[in-house]
């Protein structure tokens, strides 16, 4: 049986190297590759791969959001998140999005190939170290709005700018920031952004 693959990664060299590596496996065929997250679903629907390998950070749509759409619109296609960012919160969000696998990019080629074959057989495959980290870190304590505010605060936006972008009052933004700072046990909004980002909560 030939396993048809789609590879999505915004870094051309990484994507091409990955495709070349996967093509060395006798039972794999790369049927499509894309460089943007918002191209994933159309490519999956057109080429009908058995497995979509998705990077997380891509323009247009991140890999986790793309995974959720793929699993909803093309349930026969298994999703494996393949990322540089081995963050516990990302793993939890990937599983929530319906991903069948989560492999970090520095894994050996045979580990990735084995993961692909196992998800096709119906298994869930997760990087072991990341699984342990996820249990240690736990679920994100942030509400959806607190997360939104921290994401906008990433670039150093002022309270007024955050309020304008999210259509909230400045007082409400201050409350969300205060809550997020408390929940991340940090001293200010930029520390809160850093901690939440490191844990994959954003």
Image: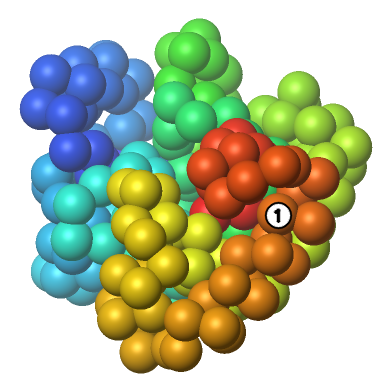
**In which quarter of the view is residue 135 placed?**
top right
What residue is drawn where x is 35% and y is 89%?
167
Q: Is residue 46 visible?
A: yes
**Vertical side of 7 occupied by 104: above or below:** above
What residue is drawn where x is 38% and y is 79%?
163
Query: Disc 1 designates what residue?
Result: 181
**Vertical side of 79 occupied by 104: above or below:** above
Residue 20 horizontal side relative to residue 107, left or right: left
Residue 77 horizontal side relative to residue 23, left or right: right
Q: How is the image coloured?
A: rainbow
Q: Residues within 10 Å of mark 1 (few under 14, many from 20)?
A: many
Q: Please provide percent x and percent y for residue 66.
A: 35, 64
What residue is drawn where x is 21% and y is 21%?
14
The quarter of the rendered structure image containing the N terminus is top left
Q: Please provide percent x and percent y for residue 87.
A: 62, 35
SS for callout 1: helix
What residue is drawn where x is 30% and y is 81%?
164
Q: Is residue 3 visible?
A: no
């Amino acid at each position: 049986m030939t396993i048809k693959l789609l590879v999505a990664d915004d870094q051309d060299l990484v994507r091409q190297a990955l495709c070349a590596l996967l093509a060395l496996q006798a039972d794999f065929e790369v049927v499509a590759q894309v460089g943007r997250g918002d191209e994933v679903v159309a490519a999956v629907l057109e080429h009908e791969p058995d497995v979509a390998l998705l990077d997380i950070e891509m323009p247009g749509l991140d890999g986790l959001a793309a995974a959720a759409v793929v699993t909803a619109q093309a349930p026969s296609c298994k999703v494996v998140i393949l990322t540089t960012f081995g963050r516990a919160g990302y793993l939890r969000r990937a599983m929530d999005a319906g991903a069948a696998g989560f492999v970090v990019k520095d894994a050996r080629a045979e580990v990735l190939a084995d993961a692909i074959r196992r998800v096709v057989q119906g298994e869930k495959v997760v990087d072991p170290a990341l699984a342990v980290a996820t249990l240690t870190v736990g679920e994100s304590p942030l509400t959806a709005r607190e997360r939104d505010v921290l994401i906008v605060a990433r670039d150093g936006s002022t309270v007024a700018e955050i309020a304008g972008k999210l259509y909230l009052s400045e007082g409400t933004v201050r409350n969300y920031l205060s809550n997020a700072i408390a929940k991340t046990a940090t001293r200010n909004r930029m520390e809160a952004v850093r901690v939440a980002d490191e844990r994959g909560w954003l």
